[in-house]
Image (cartoon, helix red, strand yellow):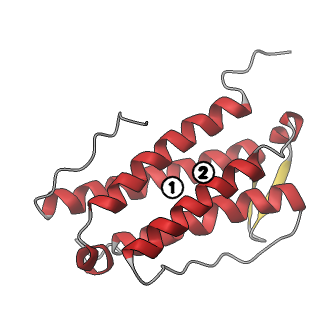
Amino acid sequence: MPTAVLTPAELLAHWQGLRRVTRRVIEAFPEDQLYTFSIGGMRPFAVLTAEMLAIGVPMAKQIVTGEVTQFEEKAPATKAELLAKWDEATTELDALYNQIAPERFGETITLFGQYTGTVWSQFFYAIDNENHHRGQGYVYLRALGIEPPPFWDRQ
């Protein structure tokens, strides 16, 4: 049997560290710019954050329960609500993720009725998607003259 590079618990810890960085990016935005600022036709960061929220917990719920849901993204109306939803999702993600048996990570699943891959690959997609959108947030913050939080500080 090959040696795993990461255990499921290590992957979750890595992702939650990245989620803490993303939360600080949300916090750094002035409220009005969070919902309106865009460069080159990209979506505002609140909309990008809503996409991240629409992936993580719903994905973990489907893996745990087998119940397929439709992909739905809707940004909460205020920055405070967005941060509260982010925190709620962080707690819920921990609870759901920890219900997934390690042997299930190699199973093939189809998320939201359309995206097929292994459980591992689905989690890596969610992490990659968040990293990509957080990078857009960094560009937005710099364009607004705001220093983004350090990406390496995952505490």
Residue at image x 77%, y 53%? 96
Residue 52: where, in percent of width, then height?
53, 63
Residue 68: where, in percent of width, then height?
83, 71
Left or right placement of residue 23 versus residue 53 in this view? left
Which quadrant is home to the C terminus? Answer: top left
Residue at image x 71%, y 65%? 58
Left or right placement of residue 31 versus residue 108 in this view? left
In the rendered structure, which amino acid carries the disc numbered 1? Answer: Asn
Q: Residue 125 carries which label?
A: 2
Residue 81: where, in percent of width, then height?
46, 75
- Badge 2 local density, few (<14 within 10 Å), some, or many (20+)? some
Q: What element carries label 2?
A: helix
* Vertical placement of residue 137 versus 151, above or below: below
Q: Name the residue under label 1.
A: 129
- Picture quadrant of residue 53: bottom right
| Contact between labelled residues 1 and 2, with CB atoms less than 8 Å apart | yes
In the rendered structure, which amino acid carries the disc numbered 2? Answer: Tyr
Which quadrant is home to the N terminus? Answer: top right
Q: Which mark is residue 69?
A: none
- Badge 1 local density, few (<14 within 10 Å), some, or many (20+)? some
